[in-house]
Image: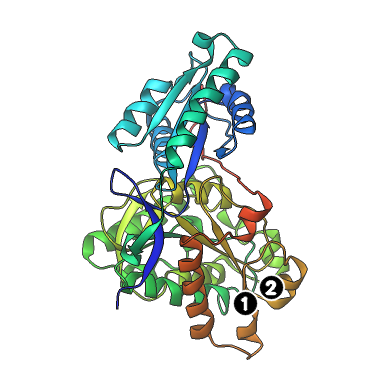
């Protein structure tokens, strides 16, 4: 039997689980204006970041890919791009990428419009038009095969790999079994688990790419004279009982379940295959979420043992607590408690099935705790000095 959720079918064929209008600054110089516009227009969200100017070469491509992919996320019905007018990543560059995704957008140039006040007034009118268009969208039954679920973990503890990550792995297997897509990332937290992932690769090309991505991450730190163990495990991980990076990595990859890794993609790159996908990207939680959304994830499932409140501007984040103490202490931030597994009250399979059902409910409109509280964190990584 085909399992459905209630989603928004876009004109470009993508399916969203939310129906946002996004006010997006293409540069930090336009961020305040974008926020002002969003505050004036009900039904819009904004995403503040510190980038957009001075990027060259590989980093410019990373920025463009992330910004355009994020703005084209299926949860976004329309976008108002807000630019200053003289930045490196100008409106036309981002707009060209969005056109390739067949995303609905409008543009606002602050310098041409005449400054903050005129831009906010003009932007509010454009945003209002986009909101009116988005209001015509209606949810319809959609197969789980259309879902792209991103996986993240932050503030892991000693039992994350026993409870929450294992249970999410069960849910991941169910998504893949329904011909959906699951993306896991955080390459630094795969160091030490290279061969485990390599054995799960669907073919030799994918196997080599997985090894290469992890090796390159480790090598890049060594070139700078740094030891990854200065940050991994983090102080919070250590306080939570984790002892080594290898221990953390072996627990982290359990979120991906047991199915083969069918593709390795770059940060913010959209996969062209269904199934379990590995994304090469940083372990920074907010950055990781942004990359997953730029790659097309409509929902993120986030495990934690120490606790974190973060969300995203355009997609729901389902928080899974690894232990009951955290669940009780940060109840307003947590959606599901996997701590019952270690207490012997529930099984990994049982909690995993509950997470899968929660994904379907959230995809159909149920709000997560991060959404209720208004969390909308967003960030993009820098890879070279900004000029």
Q: Residues within 10 Å of mark 2 (few under 14, many from 20)?
A: some
**Residue 87 at x, y = what percent?**
48, 18
Q: Is residue 219 visible?
A: no
Which of 94 and 362 lies nearest the eye of the viewer? Answer: 362
Residue 117 shown left or right of residue 351 in the figure:
right
Q: In what element is the residue under mark 2?
A: loop
Q: Name which quarter of the figure residue 91 lies in.
A: top left
Residue 211, numbered label? none
Q: Residues within 10 Å of mark 1 (few under 14, many from 20)?
A: many
Label 2 vs label 1, nearer the camera:
1
**Residue 96 at x, y = what percent?**
32, 27
Q: Is residue 324 above or below residue 80?
A: below
Q: CA distance from mark 2 to mark 1?
A: 8 Å
Q: In what element is the residue under mark 1?
A: loop
Label whose residue precedes the other's in the sequence (2 or 1): 1
Q: Is residue 198 above or below residue 39?
A: below
Q: Is residue 382 above or below residue 273?
A: above
**Residue at the spot x=58%, y=59% of the render?**
367
Which residue is the site of mark 2?
241
**Residue at the spot x=41%, y=61% of the render?**
6
**Residue at the spot x=28%, y=48% of the render?**
13
**Residue 113 at x, y = what percent?**
52, 11
Residue 170 shown left or right of residue 96 in the figure:
right
Residue 159, numbered label? 1
Which of 293 and 287 lies nearest the eye of the viewer? Answer: 293
Q: Is residue 130 visible?
A: yes
**Residue at the spot x=26%, y=53% of the render?**
272
Q: Are marks 2 and 1 in contact (CB under 8 Å)?
A: yes
Furthest residue in direction bottom, as rendered: 344
**Residue 56 at x, y = what percent?**
42, 25
Quadrant that contains the N terminus: bottom left
Q: Name which quarter of the figure residue 313 lies in.
A: top right
């Amino acid at each position: 039997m085909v399992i459905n959720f209630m989603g928004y079918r876009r004109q470009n064929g993508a399916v969203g689980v939310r129906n946002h209008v996004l006010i997006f600054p293409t540069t930090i110089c336009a961020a305040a204006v974008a926020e002002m516009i969003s505050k004036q227009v009900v039904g819009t969200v904004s995403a503040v970041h510190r980038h957009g100017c001075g990027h060259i070469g590989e980093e410019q491509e990373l920025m463009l890919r992330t910004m355009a992919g994020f703005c084209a996320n299926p949860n976004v019905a329309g976008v108002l791009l807000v630019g200053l007018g003289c930045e490196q990543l100008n409106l036309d560059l981002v707009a060209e990428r969005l056109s390739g995704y067949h995303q609905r957008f409008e543009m606002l140039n602050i310098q041409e419009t005449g400054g903050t006040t005129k831009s906010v007034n003009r932007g509010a009118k454009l945003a209002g038009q986009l909101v009116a268009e988005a209001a015509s969208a209606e949810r319809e039954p959609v197969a789980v095969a259309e879902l792209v679920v991103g996986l993240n973990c932050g503030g892991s503890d000693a039992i994350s790999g026993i409870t929450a990550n294992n249970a999410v792995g069960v849910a991941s297997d169910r998504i893949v079994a329904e011909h959906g897509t699951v993306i896991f990332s955080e390459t630094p937290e795969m160091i030490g688990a290279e061969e485990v992932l390599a054995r799960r690769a669907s073919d030799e090309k994918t196997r080599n790419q997985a090894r290469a991505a992890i090796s390159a991450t480790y090598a890049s730190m060594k070139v700078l004279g740094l030891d990854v163990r200065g940050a991994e495990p983090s102080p919070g991980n250590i306080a939570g009982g984790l002892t080594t990076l290898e221990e953390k990595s072996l627990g982290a990859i359990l979120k991906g379940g047991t199915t083969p890794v069918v593709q390795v993609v770059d940060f913010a790159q959209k996969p062209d295959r269904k199934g379990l996908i590995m994304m090469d990207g940083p372990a920074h939680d907010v950055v990781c979420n942004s990359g997953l959304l730029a790659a097309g994830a409509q929902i993120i499932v986030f495990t934690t043992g120490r606790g974190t409140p973060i969300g995203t501007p355009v997609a729901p984040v389902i928080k899974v607590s690894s232990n009951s103490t955290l669940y009780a202490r940060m109840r307003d931030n947590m959606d599901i408690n996997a701590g019952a597994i270690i207490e012997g009250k529930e099984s990994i399979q049982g909690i995993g099935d509950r997470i899968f059902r929660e994904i379907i409910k959230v995809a159909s409109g149920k709000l997560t705790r991060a959404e209720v509280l208004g969390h909308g964190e967003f960030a993009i990584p820098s890879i070279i000095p900004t000029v």
